[in-house]
Amino acid sequence: MVICFSDNTQYFPVLGVNIISIIGCFAVIITFLTLRDSQTYSLRLVFYIAITDFIKSISFCIPCHMLENNILINFSAFLARASAVITCLWAVAISNALYQIVINNVEKFEKFHKRWIIILIILIALNIGLMFINVYTSVDTLCTFNLTPLGNYLRIGTIYAPEWLFLIYSILAYYKVQKKIRNLTLTETKAHSIKRLFVFSIATFITYLPMSIIRIVEMFYNDCIINEAYLFAFCIYSLAGLLNALAYFWAFNLHMIWKKKTIIVSIPLRASEVSSINLLYHSLAK
């Protein structure tokens, strides 16, 4: 591994952007808990993401290059890795919820939500298990997988590959939903609400991609240019909490306008279209 920066040179930019991210996450959490009458299912998923981003940002603020206790290193790495993959899980859950509403006319999400909870428990259990096989260490200022072949395989298999798969699913879901809503008589506000929530979900993954690409390149080619690119990409990755907060308030403001001004009326459409519109309204605006 090529060392091009001192630990402090890397740590303080990362610390700064994560403090900003923590503030953004905290704003979302407080807003959601305060405005209880606006807690739709999709916005509740955004709230879950804010919590996991909050935990992830705190873990990145820990100066792992100063830690010598393996238990603390393992715990910090667990927080970072588990919160990152759980954030992706809730982001894809948003895409799936919108897909189920528009494509499959689903109104009740209890069954789907239970499935996400089961996956969540499995992911947490797997990440806890990794703490006991000695794969975590301090790399630069972070607690993460070590740079052995096993550590690299785990990094790709448990972090980057799921992120790419979730992104592909979200893009495909968005394409199918867009194709469907073109044939529905939706108000402009409702159509924009769907797009905004999808943009939020996809934007979550986009912040992850530069770092995942650079990390993979770094396995085969490593010099100071790659290190500089990685530091920049990691700062983008760390700003996910702030970007998610901006996306939340973007969607939330539109939702409030919609809630105040939209009145459900009877529209002479085919039964399937009426069903889709009503379910869309109740799932996103109630």
Image (cartoon, rainbow, N blue to C red):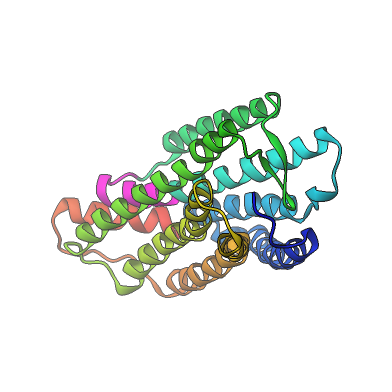
Q: How many marks?
A: 0
* Residue 208 picture location, percent across and down: 51, 55
Residues 235 and 95: in front is 235
Q: In front: 122, or 188?
A: 122
Front residue of 156 and 216: 216
Residue 81, given in percent of the width and then of the height, sits at: 63, 42
Q: Is residue 205 left or right of residue 244?
A: left
Q: Find out whether residue 97 is within the magenta segment.
A: yes
Main secondary-structure element of the magenta-colored stretch: helix
Q: Is residue 175 above or below residue 90?
A: below
- Give the magenta-colored segment's residue range: 94-106
Residue 236 in magenta? no
| Residue 145 occupies quadrant | top right
Residue in front for this viewpoint, 179 or 158:
158
Q: From the viewer's perspective, is 225 left or right of 143?
A: left
Residue 97's spot in the image, x, y percent?
A: 39, 48
The x and y percentages for residue 238 are: 63, 60
